[in-house]
Amino acid sequence: MSNEPRGFIDEIAHDIYRINIRVPGLMPGGFSFNQYLVVDERPLLFHTGPRKLFALVRAQIETVLPLAALRYVAFSHVEADECGALPDFLAAAPGARPVCSQIGAMVSVSDLVDVEPIGLVDGQTLDIGRRQLAWQSAPHLPHGWDCGYLFEPSSRTLFCGDLFTQPGLGERALVDDDIFEASEAMRHGMDYYAHSRNAPTLLDKLAQLRPQLLACMHGSAWAGDGATLLRRLDAALARSPGG
């Protein structure tokens, strides 16, 4: 198998596409970076992927729509795989604006790019046409003061970033079997959670949304009872607050 990164795209819900960039040589067993394209009157991308993978992500998006059609480039928090390619996307889609938390806009994004970001507060909605996505502030869950997620209520999709990170290449776009054990092994092995004292409250808030599709950033997207999975994570964090 070649160690060169490769890109794939799959529709995982109506007009919601998972772009999967597989990087076999990044770690044993490989690793993947997912971006999510929501096609609507004002299309939105959630996650940009790292800057060096921009061409691969662009190629997959353009199998669905011209890159210049993007109007929003959103992400959970400032980190290379979340928004490293943001300047490239804004250059290629001059009508697009960055979307992040209000904290992220204030402390980072307004300085990182020249396009004014849309900084959302908890519960604020973003109208992209037929859909309205609601920002879910989640500081330090799993990491980053500016961290948060988007929830799309009609499909009950939670764009959940680094929650439930899975190792491997993520060859299956959407699964309904267990991803919890794999994500827990990853969490324990790399200890990338901030172990915030507010994690139980934040996870309960996300569980109350009753998501049915978890758009994970690494590994497969997952369909099922998202509230139960989020509460399993809460219980696991409570058992091991230090990692």
Image (tube, rainbow, N blue to C red):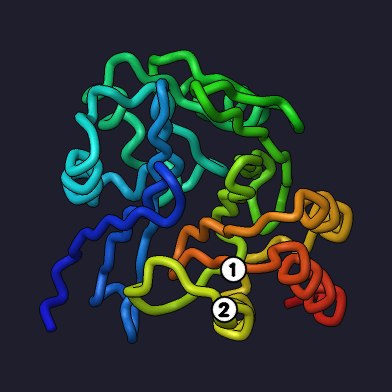
Residue 206 shows up from this direction = yes
Q: Nearer the viewer, residue 206 or 56?
A: 206
Position of residue 66 measured from the top left corner of the image (x, y, whole percent):
20, 29
Q: Residue 72: name its quadrant.
A: top left
Position of residue 97 measured from the top left corner of the image (x, y, whole percent):
43, 20
Q: CA distance from mark 2 to mark 1?
A: 7 Å
| Labels 2 and 1 touching (C-beta < 8 A) | yes
Residue depicted at x 41% and y 22%: 42
Q: State left or right for residue 83 relative to residue 62.
A: right
Residue furthest left as drawn:
2
Residue depicted at x 83% and y 50%: 205
Task: Give the labeled residue for mark 1.
Answer: 164
Q: Nearer the viewer, residue 38 or 93?
A: 38
Which mark is first along the chain, 1 or 2?
1
Residue kind at label 2, given as amino acid type: Ile
Q: State left or right for residue 204 relative to residue 173.
A: right
Disc number for residue 179: 2
Position of residue 145 measured from the top left corner of the image (x, y, whole percent):
69, 43
Residue kind at label 1, given as amino acid type: Phe
Does residue 49 sit above or below 171 in this rendering? above
Q: Nearer the viewer, mark 2 or mark 1?
A: 2
**Quick one: quadrant of the N terminus?**
bottom left
